[in-house]
Amino acid sequence: MANNGNSAAMPKTPAAAELRAELAKKESDLGINGRLTGTQRIAAIFDEGTFVETGKYAKSSKNEFSDGGEFEGVITGYGAIDGRLVFAFVQDFSRMKGALGEMHAKKICALYDLALKSNAPVIGVFDSAGAFVLEGVSAMSGYGKIMKKVAASSGIIPQIAVVAGVCSGALATIAAMFDFTVASKQNGSIFVNPPFIMKSKKGGAGLGSIEAAYKLGLADHVCENEVEAYAKAKELLNYLPQNCGDGTVYSVSNDEINRLNTDISDIIAKDGYDMKEVITAVCDDAKFFERMAGYAPEILTGFITLNSMVIGIVANEPSVNGGKLTANAAKKAAKHIAFCDDFDIPLLTLVDTEGYETDAANESAPYSDALADLAYGYSASDNAKVSVVIGKAYGAAYTLMCSKSLGADIALAVDNAKISAMPTESAVAFAWSDKVKDNSKRAELENEWNISVASPVNAARDGDIDDIVSCDELRQRISAAFEMLSDR
């Protein structure tokens, strides 16, 4: 009702307790079909009784097109997760369909100011119908202000996006700016252009779904529902420091640090073995927290603990296309390397690759640009880096996978590793073409090449490998290297 000068005509403002009760009732009715309301999301994220809301009564101003609402479509605040201070903004579809307007953006920006001042992580829950169009340019400006805050926080505090509902347009861009994205398949979607538009385009069917986002590398983790997504985000948080100044996290493990890896020799003896088996054999308690598993599976990224120290992992996956270093693999690895460097998380690289991929799709990726990002990531990073050649390391892919020349502090190789400028078969055909005309000698020549040229002994003599180790002692030797490099 417009103000006509008669104070009696003004509507009575409800007391704070009445507003909270009304909102709670509204939300309890809407928390159905797996789509949680804002307060339910808060309860799923934070330790019970620890959340403190900020900007609780902030609301958009009335204008000729809209009378605003009692509450904005986002809840902001801070609390504890497993006893750690964490900030969060939670978009709430039950409030104005989570539409983002000027005040919505202002609340998120104010939260970021507090998070940066406190040097604590931010979790953002995305579920919005988009911009509050009745505010026009002010709403669009809000997107830009949030982007600027997210960018300013990058590399300073960890940021985890949880896609619980619709994450579209500029909000999809904001979510992609976060360090990690966890998505719920039940109600989540990530897209720039609406799926109904893309469906009519060639190759556009299925785009916008969480499954598609996972395969495109837009989601690090995909969960069946919201509750699982929040649990995954909290599990991820256990591997992350509070901020860039704290250094890597130390956990508690009863795993024997001097435990021998008696099974690794048998694992890597299989053609196209699963590198995850090597990782879980080396790390504490066989726990590997993988990220971006749906994207570029020929390379693995994630976190482990080793002697209770959180370590980042980059590893070729021989079971997928021989672990070849594709454009997408390089892009995936470079992103993880940059994060570990920003937050001083030590990095372990396990190498077993047949080299570059030779196809038109990778060459037009563009390939060299993606490989340049990987080279830059390793060479410019200051965190502790240990690399181990587990199997094959052929061509420039050996150089790019954290070789000593590119920046590894300690470079190891197992005794049966093969390090060569070319795959053995190609090298023999190239170097000894006159001899391989007799196919009966091919196997003999290839064996001679592996012993005389591709042996890790040659790389060690040149100083490119610090030591040749047995598979049994991998856990011991890798852990000792990181302990030496640690400033704990």
Image (cartoon, rainbow, N blue to C red):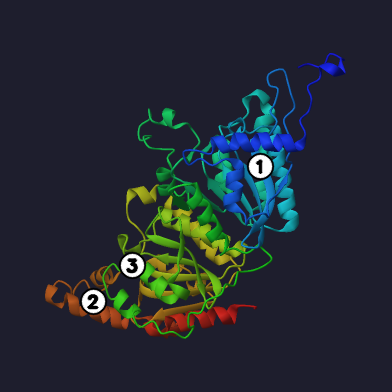
Closer to the camera, 394 or 24?
A: 24
Going 86% across and 15% down the picture, which residue do you hit?
6
Where is residue 143 drawn, in percent x and y? 64, 37
At label 1, the amino acid type is: Ile
284 versus 397 height, above or below: below
Q: CA distance from mark 2 to mark 3?
A: 25 Å
Task: Give the residue at mark 1.
Answer: 75
Quadrant in which the N terminus is drawn: top right
Nearer the observer: mark 2 or 3; the answer is: 3
Q: Do the residues bearing badges 2 and 1 touch, measured as CB atoms within 8 Å?
A: no
Q: Relative to 57, does residue 421 appear above or below in the rendering? A: below
- Mark 2 lies on residue: 446
Label 1 SS: strand
Q: CA distance from mark 1 to mark 3?
A: 43 Å
For mark 3, give the secondary structure.
loop
SS class, disc 2: helix
Q: Which mark is first along the chain, 1 or 2?
A: 1
In the drawing, does residue 279 fall left or right of residue 142? left
Q: Amino acid at mark 3?
A: Asp
Which residue occupies 44% across, 38% down? 208
Residue position for label 3: 274
| Residue 450 occupies quadrant | bottom left
